Each structure stands twice: as structure tokens, then as C-alpha cells.
């Protein structure tokens, strides 16, 4: 029986390897270890995989020189310098220094990033293969200049006579980091530390560091945000000069400044924000006249009045670029004296604002606008939940007519947006609730209801009007741009949609996509399809060059409505009312803010993942055998991913762990089919999983898959259907993220 099992594994590994070699992801000069990790082959099956590689060399599909495997095609040439930006999943993009010659970012597959980290100045060797619609690809050949001298991580191995090893989220699980402790410092497994890099270890060698200081232990949830701030090099405390400038403005708006502005203090304005918000950027006023026209006022905190170019506040805000939002805490762009007080549009106090006044006809068409510096006095602060209760008649408020009028205009603007090809995803947001000590208490599903939608529609319109106005005036600004997705990506998404049972054309237009999502959101698979579509699109960035915003279907768009938490918005305010910003400065602001936006997102996601794992770990201690409902989200030739619905956490099961059957990958239908049992795994299948263990150091969770014969009828009626055998396979182990080889200490991809 063991021999039969070995033969099946050999066949599985050979098939997976051949599919990988035939794809675009393969690149030359990979070791056997590189290939094994790339294909997620467990370490205990290394001998079988070696036989597979030997066969591929003997058959001529691969060549091996000095222990490295290559194909005869796809040689690399042409060296391009640039800055590396790594994605959390390990791959990256290099932004070329010479944008005129290389206008597109260069894609770097995960296994070709070498030992470079986010922000490093690198040299890239371009591939000579034909450029796909995704853009050029290459590999990093050298790190020219390091972005950092210190890194933060967690002690993962601490042996008396051996090396002390650390895991660093910024470098990933595949990097061996040796952490040397000074004589007067004792460390233990789980200690979170800041390390000075002694040797980065070129060409994949280990990175050697010296421990600088301790942050706290991984068991202490109160240190999670401090550790993330260190790990992702965020700025937390404000310099004395910036705090001093902020305090100098006092706590009230001076009358002299009020007299210079259009006075709107008697105009009824309200704010609608999340429960925990302290920085209220925007307030809304709205009236409908007898002709049916809507008069909308979007009033934005006038941060540019306080934060002047070149001031200590401005220098610090430029470094931060944006606020970073963690569960239970915000690391703000501006000191609290401004962000939570003088610039925050709190109720019943005078506040300086920049107002966009817009008039819409009864069909929702913009017929007029103007922009002015104003002063307001917010009449009411609503949370989204409170506003929804008023609209549902569950709460009394004298502002109910205003809120109902806002809903009317919102629907008109949404219809206009649909007409121009913008697609809306009504995705529920899962918020992790933490106590004062940072310990997660549970999760809260925040529905994208009409209160969220109306505020978003008004902000989108104000941003569009400001961008169009400044363009018409001939002024340069930081546009928010979004390129069209590559046709190749749309075709890939069409295949994914078909796997969930939704049929669309290979290159769907906006109307077809909106119809798809309208249907999908009525099923459990809507969020996964929306996420898949978003991943297929290019990232939105800031740029002084306007190419439009594909996702919103707009020709002119910028960010104007959140100057308390985004520096680009502050720059747009200055362009509106003060001196125009030069082209070089705009480009520097755009690049810096685009980069920092991605870094903040990484830090936020890192902490959210850790909090979710802490919550799961606590749940397991209370109920060790609790089953979680999950949905299969992606199926590949080597296994499938699933999403644990309660916590929106991804897991992965390798094909070699699916009972003792031989599973065949049906590429057309994107499913795995058991040759003997007829058991199939397809995107959209519901499964049950039980948590086995949580590793807070490596940010991983291990699961048991509880498989039942499928009689599911919840798949879309247009779907392909699913066959299952009546047999119940044994439990199989699944791990969060793609599986990694099993070692003495399990290290796997997040």
C-alpha cells in the first residue's frame, strides 16, 4: 500500500511540475529547494520530488547546471535600476528610475526577488520573453542601496548552543535571520525585538543582525501595534516642534479668521462617521428647492489653514503621508491637537472648512458648482448606525428629513455612476473589536448600507468636481488614477466567475460586470468574486499625470475630502486656495504618498491578522472542537484555498493531503476530481473545518478539514454542479496560506 501511495505522489508531483514549467511563472536558475518551495512540496517527500526532477532532466524538459534548473528559452538581459515595492504575498514591482524609457513597473515573481526588501534600490534584469498585457517581467540581480538599517521581528528559535533565529514579517518566512543578542540581554522564543542589520546576506545567504532592544513578548497583545510600528517603520510619536506648533493655535477658531470667510454657521450641517471616529473630515448640508433641484454642500476641514508649507507640522505630515488605522488605535498624520480637535468637525463648535457647493437637477445631473473657504458649526454628529436607525424609523431626530433627502440624492448619483460604467461592491467589513489592553473580544460585521453609500457618493462627487475645476483652471494637482485592467486579467476573472457558476464573456464590459455582482451579492460567493475582481485590477495610485480612473469611470478624479488623514488632500487644498505647487513637488508627493499608502495597508493587515489569530486561539481554549464554516475560494493544480467565514481568514489544503486518492485538476472548470472516489473540490463549495493550532509568531493557523458528502443546493443555478462520492474521506490537515514544507519548526507562508 505504501508503494501505491508513493506512486500516486510521484504522479501528482510530476503533473504539477510539468504544469508549472509550461506556465509563464517559471524562470531559470532555480535550485531543487526553490522548486520544491515554489510548488509547495512537503519536505518529507523531498526524495520523491528528486526523482521527478531527475526524470524531467532525462526527458529534456529541464537542464541542470551546478545544481540549478533552467529551460532553454527565456534568457534574461538588459539591466534596469529602480525601487522595489513588495506585495504581502511575496512578489513585487520595481518602479524604474527612467520613466521615459520604462513607463511601466516591472513585475518580479516571488522567487526572483532575491534578498531585496521593500524600498530597496535595485537593479533588474528584464526578461526577453514577449511582454504580456500585465507588463514587463524580470528578476532582481543586485541590491544597490538598502532602504533600512534596522528591522523588527520575533524570536522563533532560541537554543543554548545554537543560533538564535528571528522571523521578520517584512522579509517573509523563507529568510533565515540570525539574531545575535548582546551579553547583557537574555531573549526567549516569542520575544519581539528590534535588530540592527549587520549583513543582509547576498545571493540568498542568511541575514545576520544584532538585537538592539526588546519590544515585548508575543503573548502580550498590548504590544501588537508598537511592534507593527517598528516592523513597518512607521512614525508614531510627534517631534516637540510639531506638537508646539499645533498647541500654538489654541482650541478655538479666532473671530478675525471667521470674518474673512463665508459664514455657514446657521446652515444645518451634520457629520456621519464610524462609531470610533475622532477625526471628522467632512460635514454635509443639503436642501431641495421647489423645482426639485438638490443643493448639496460638502464641507471639508481646512487643514491647509493650519499646516503651512515648510512648517514643522508640514515636514512631519510629509513623512507620514497618511494616518494608519489599527484595531482600537490610530497612528495619525497630524497631532491630536489638530486631528481630534481644531480640525475635526465636532458638533456645536466653530470650524474652518473648504466647501464645495453643488446643484443637481431632479435626475441627479450636476448643473452648477462653486468652491469657497467657509466656517461652519456642525449641528449633529451621527454614527452610521444612528443615522440608519433614524432612516428606519427606530430613532427620533429632527434631522430625519435631511437624512431622507440625502438618501434620495444618493440614489440618483448611484444611477449616474452606473450609467458611466462604475462598478459598486456592497461588501461587508469585518471589524475586530479589542479592549483597552489590545485583547480581541470578537468581531463586528459592518454592513455597507445606505448611510455608508450616501456619504461615499457625496465625497466622490466633491473629489470629481475639484479635480475637474483645477484641470479647467490649468493647475497641476495630484490626481488619483486607475489604469484599465489587462485583458489577460479579465479573462482570468471570467474563468474564476465560471467556476462559481456565473457566466460572463472573456472581456466583460461594465454593465455585464455590474449585472454579475448584483446577482453574486445575493449568494454566499459575492464577496469572494468581488475580491477576485479587485485583485485582477491594477492598483490606484497618485500621479501628476491624469489618465482617468477606470474603477470609478471618471476622466478627472483626485482626493480632496480627507486632509486630516491624507497628505495628498492637503496638497490639493493648497492648490485650490494658495500658490500652485510645482511639477517636481507634485511628482514627489504623488510617489511618496502612493508608497506610504501601501506600507500602511501592510501594517494594518499584519495587526488585523494577528488579532484574528489571537481570537481564534482564545476560542479554541474555550471550545477545542468547534467547527467553522468555510467556502472554497480558489482551486489550483496543487490544492485549494478556503475562507473561514467567521473571521475571514484564508486556509490552504495541498493535493497530497486529500485522502489517498489521486486528484486530477480540471483546468477548464477549475476543480480537483478524485479518480477513484469521484470526490470533487470546486470554488464555492462549502466545507467545515476545525482549528488545530495557532502560531502567533509565524502568523499561521492549522486546521482539520471535516469532509461531508455534498448535497449543496446553494450554488447558482447556472453553475456547473458538483459530483461527490458517498464515501467520507479521512480528516486532512490544512494550514493558513499556502502550505510550506514540514520542518522541525513549521514555517509557512502567511
Image (cartoon, helix red, strand yellow):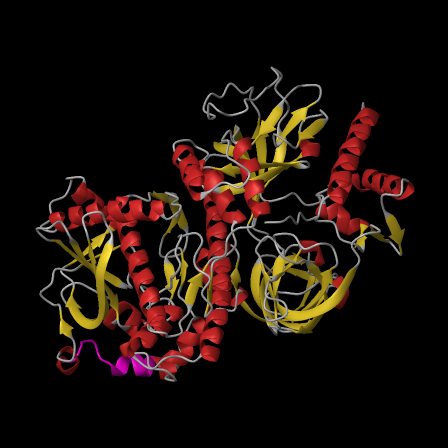
Give the quadrant of residue 86. Answer: bottom right
Q: Extreme top residue here?
A: 726
**Residue shown at the point (30%, 56%) measured from the top left:** 276
* Number of on-image labels: 0
**Residue shown at the point (33%, 43%) measured from the top left:** 447
Query: Who is closer to the viewer here, 126 or 486?
Result: 486
Side of 492 relative to 453 (left or right): right
Q: Extreme right residue here?
A: 58
Q: Position of residue 297 (x, y in %)?
A: 20, 61
Query: Who is closer to the viewer here, 230 or 37?
Result: 37
Query: Who is closer to the viewer here, 740 or 468?
Result: 468
Q: Position of residue 368 (x, y in %)?
A: 21, 61
Q: Is residue 304 above or below residue 7?
A: below
Side of 633 relative to 323 (left or right): right
The answer to whether residue 187 shows anywhere in this view is no
The stretch drawn in magenta includes residue 398: no
The stretch drawn in magenta includes residue 253: yes
Q: Is residue 489 above or below residue 668?
A: below
Q: Is residue 670 above or below residue 508?
A: above
The answer to whether residue 37 shows anywhere in this view is yes
Query: For the magenta stretch, what is the residue range?
Result: 243-254
Side of 466 relative to 220 (left or right): left
Q: Position of residue 564 (x, y in %)?
A: 32, 68
Q: Position of residue 405 (x, y in %)?
A: 16, 48
Give the quadrant of residue 199. Answer: bottom right
Q: Quadrant of the N terminus?
A: top right
Amino acid at each position: 500500500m505504501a508503494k501505491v501511495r508513493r506512486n500516486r505522489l510521484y504522479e501528482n508531483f510530476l503533473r504539477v511540475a510539468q504544469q508549472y514549467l509550461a506556465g509563464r511563472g517559471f524562470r531559470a536558475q532555480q535550485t531543487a529547494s526553490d522548486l520544491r518551495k515554489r510548488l509547495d512540496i512537503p519536505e518529507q517527500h523531498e526524495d520523491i520530488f528528486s526523482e521527478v526532477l531527475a526524470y524531467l532532466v532525462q526527458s529534456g524538459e529541464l537542464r541542470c547546471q551546478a545544481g540549478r534548473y533552467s529551460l532553454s528559452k527565456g534568457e534574461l538581459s538588459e539591466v534596469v535600476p529602480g525601487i522595489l515595492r513588495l506585495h504581502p504575498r511575496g512578489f513585487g514591482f520595481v518602479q524604474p528610475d527612467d520613466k521615459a524609457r520604462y513607463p511601466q513597473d516591472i513585475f518580479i515573481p516571488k522567487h526572483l526577488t532575491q534578498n531585496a526588501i521593500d524600498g530597496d534600490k535595485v537593479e533588474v534584469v528584464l526578461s526577453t520573453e514577449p511582454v504580456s498585457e500585465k507588463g514587463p517581467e524580470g528578476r532582481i540581480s543586485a541590491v544597490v542601496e538598502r532602504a533600512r538599517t534596522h528591522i523588527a521581528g520575533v524570536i522563533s528559535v532560541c537554543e543554548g548552543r545554537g543560533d538564535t533565529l528571528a522571523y521578520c514579517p517584512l522579509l517573509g518566512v523563507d529568510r533565515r535571520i540570525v539574531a545575535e543578542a548582546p551579553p547583557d540581554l537574555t531573549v526567549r522564543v516569542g520575544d519581539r525585538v528590534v535588530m540592527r542589520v549587520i549583513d543582509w546576506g547576498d545571493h540568498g545567504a542568511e541575514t545576520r543582525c544584532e538585537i538592539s532592544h526588546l519590544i515585548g513578548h508575543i503573548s502580550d497583545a498590548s504590544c501588537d501595534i508598537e511592534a507593527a510600528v517598528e516592523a513597518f517603520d512607521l512614525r508614531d510619536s510627534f517631534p516637540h516642534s510639531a506638537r508646539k506648533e499645533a498647541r500654538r493655535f489654541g482650541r478655538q477658531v479666532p473671530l478675525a479668521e471667521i470674518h474673512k470667510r463665508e459664514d455657514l454657521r446657521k446652515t444645518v450641517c451634520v457629520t456621519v462617521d464610524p462609531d470610533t471616529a475622532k477625526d471628522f473630515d467632512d460635514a454635509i448640508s443639503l436642501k431641495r428647492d421647489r423645482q426639485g433641484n438638490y443643493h448639496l454642500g460638502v464641507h471639508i476641514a481646512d487643514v491647509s489653514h493650519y499646516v503651512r508649507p515648510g512648517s514643522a507640522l508640514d515636514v512631519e505630515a510629509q513623512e507620514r503621508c497618511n494616518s494608519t488605522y489599527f484595531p482600537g488605535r490610530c497612528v495619525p498624520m497630524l497631532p491630536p491637537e489638530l486631528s481630534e480637535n481644531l480640525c475635526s468637525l465636532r458638533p456645536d463648535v466653530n470650524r474652518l472648512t473648504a466647501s464645495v457647493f453643488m446643484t443637481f437637477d431632479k435626475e441627479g445631473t450636476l448643473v452648477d458648482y462653486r468652491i469657497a473657504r467657509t466656517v461652519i458649526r456642525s449641528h449633529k454628529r451621527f454614527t452610521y448606525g444612528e443615522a440608519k436607525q433614524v432612516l428606519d424609523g427606530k430613532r427620533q431626530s429632527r434631522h430625519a428629513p435631511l437624512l431622507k433627502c440625502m438618501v434620495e440624492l444618493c440614489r440618483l448619483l448611484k444611477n449616474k455612476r452606473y450609467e458611466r460604467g462604475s462598478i459598486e461592491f456592497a461588501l461587508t467589513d469585518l471589524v475586530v473589536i479589542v479592549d483597552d489592553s489590545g485583547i480581541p473580544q470578537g468581531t463586528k460585521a459592518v454592513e455597507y448600507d445606505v448611510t455608508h453609500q450616501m456619504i461615499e457618493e457625496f465625497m466622490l462627487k466633491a473629489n470629481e468636481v475639484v479635480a475637474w475645476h483645477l484641470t479647467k483652471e490649468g493647475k497641476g494637482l495630484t490626481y488619483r488614477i486607475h489604469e484599465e485592467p489587462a485583458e489577460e486579467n479579465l479573462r482570468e476573472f471570467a474563468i474564476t466567475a465560471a467556476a462559481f457558476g456565473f457566466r460572463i464573456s472573456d472581456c466583460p464590459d461594465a454593465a455585464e460586470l455590474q449585472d454579475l455582482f448584483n446577482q453574486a451579492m445575493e449568494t454566499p460567493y459575492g464577496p469572494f468574486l468581488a475580491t477576485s475582481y479587485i485583485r485582477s485590477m491594477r492598483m490606484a495610485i497618485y500621479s501628476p499625470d491624469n489618465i482617468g480612473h477606470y474603477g470609478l469611470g471618471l476622466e478627472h478624479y483626485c482626493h480632496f475630502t480627507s486632509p486630516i488623514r491624507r497628505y495628498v488632500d492637503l496638497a490639493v487644498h493648497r492648490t485650490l486656495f494658495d500658490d500652485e505647487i510645482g511639477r517636481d513637488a507634485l511628482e514627489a508627493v504623488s510617489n511618496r504618498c502612493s508608497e506610504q499608502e501601501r506600507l500602511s495597508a501592510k501594517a494594518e493587515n499584519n495587526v488585523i491578522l494577528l488579532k484574528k489569530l489571537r481570537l481564534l486561539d482564545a476560542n479554541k481554549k474555550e471550545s477545542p472542537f468547534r467547527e467553522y464554516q468555510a467556502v472554497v475560494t480558489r482551486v489550483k493544480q496543487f490544492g485549494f484555498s478556503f475562507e473561514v467565514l467567521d473571521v475571514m481568514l484564508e486556509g490552504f489544503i495541498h493535493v497530497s493531503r486529500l485522502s489517498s486518492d489521486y486528484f486530477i485538476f480540471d483546468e477548464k472548470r477549475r476543480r480537483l476530481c478524485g479518480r477513484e472516489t469521484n470526490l470533487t473540490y470546486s470554488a464555492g463549495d462549502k466545507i467545515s473545518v476545525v482549528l488545530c493550532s495557532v502560531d502567533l509568531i509565524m502568523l499561521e493557523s492549522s486546521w482539520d478539514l471535516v469532509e461531508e458528502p455534498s448535497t449543496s443546493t446553494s450554488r447558482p443555478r447556472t453553475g456547473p454542479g458538483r459530483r461527490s462520492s458517498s464515501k467520507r474521506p479521512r480528516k486532512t490537515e490544512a494550514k493558513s496560506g499556502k502550505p510550506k514544507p514540514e520542518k522541525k519548526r513549521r514555517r509557512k507562508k502567511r
